[in-house]
Amino acid sequence: MSLRLAILASGNGSNAQAMFDAVERGALDADIRLVLSNRPGARVLERAAAHSLPRLCLDHTLFPDRAAYDRALADAIRGAGADTVALAGYMRLLSPDFLAAFPGRVLNIHPALLPAFPGAHGAADAAAWGVKVSGCTVHFVSDEMDCGPIIIQACVPALQDEDAGALQTRIHQLEHRIYPQALQWLAEKRLSLKGRRVFLAPAGGALAEAPAQALIWPPLEAGF
């Protein structure tokens, strides 16, 4: 079943771009109904325009509080006909009322192996800690920041002679593969939740080749 997708992003939008590309090559069964940013001039809006996608800037500074903004945000998403929300570098916490409007349909990508290093600087915090492995996580969004049930993770070595920027670049490359994959599993209704555990129903299709020196679980499938 095709996802009716709204993508929320605050900045560059490279993960949004990965979704655009996956839809266009036929790997992601989604109808992108809206690309929305809370920041005027965010590059993600330019990316959406280049693909002739519906786009909107909803400036959070023009609202009296988070609740008022999230009501307007939910109204914009519903007005676009979207039923699924993908956070792609969206740098605002979502209220419980917003999440209740799209139960089990809000996903996020985080540049660290949750539950380690939550927050806005996951990759940099991991590098500063001196970890030996790092990576990224796609998860369902819950009321508590970066704490929702995990759908897929990708792990890479953290090289001790590289800076946080270099580590984050390698993590981003995996984000652009695992996030569209997670959304496709949702589109295929293959994800089920039991407590904190997310189960993936098998499809029997071909698997994609994993990047060298990376562990991705569950494995990527053809097209990703």
Image: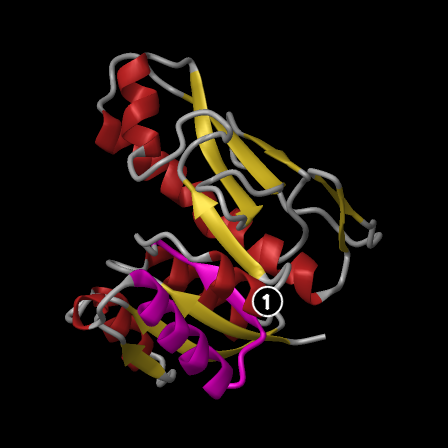
Compared across the picture, whether 193 is left or right of 183 comes to right
Compared across the picture, whether 171 is left or right of 192 comes to left
Residue sitting at 82 percent across and 50 percent down?
201
Question: Magenta residues?
Answer: 66-89
> Residue 76's spot in the image, x, y percent?
41, 81
Give the image's coloring scheme. Answer: secondary structure
Numbered marks: total: 1
Alpha-carbon neighbours of circle 1 within 10 Å: few (<14), some, or many (≥20)?
Answer: many
Compared across the picture, whether 89 is left or right of 204 comes to left
Locate the N terminus by quadrant.
bottom right
Residue sitting at 53 percent across and 71 percent down?
23
Image position of 28 with respect to 75: above or below: above
Residue 80 visible? The answer is no
Residue sitting at 47 percent across and 37 percent down?
136
Magenta highlight on residue 16: no
**Tag 1 residue:** 28
Amino acid type of the residue tagged 1 in the rendering: Leu
| Quadrant hosting residue 9 | bottom left
Compared across the picture, whether 14 is left or right of 104 comes to left
Report the front residue among 98 and 194. Answer: 98
> Residue 109's spot in the image, x, y percent?
46, 47
> Residue 205's spot in the image, x, y percent?
79, 54
Residue 119 visible? The answer is yes
Report the front residue among 33 and 213. Answer: 33
Magenta highlight on residue 73: yes
Residue sitting at 53 percent across and 61 percent down?
99
**Circle 1: element type:** loop
Report the front residue among 159 and 147. Answer: 147
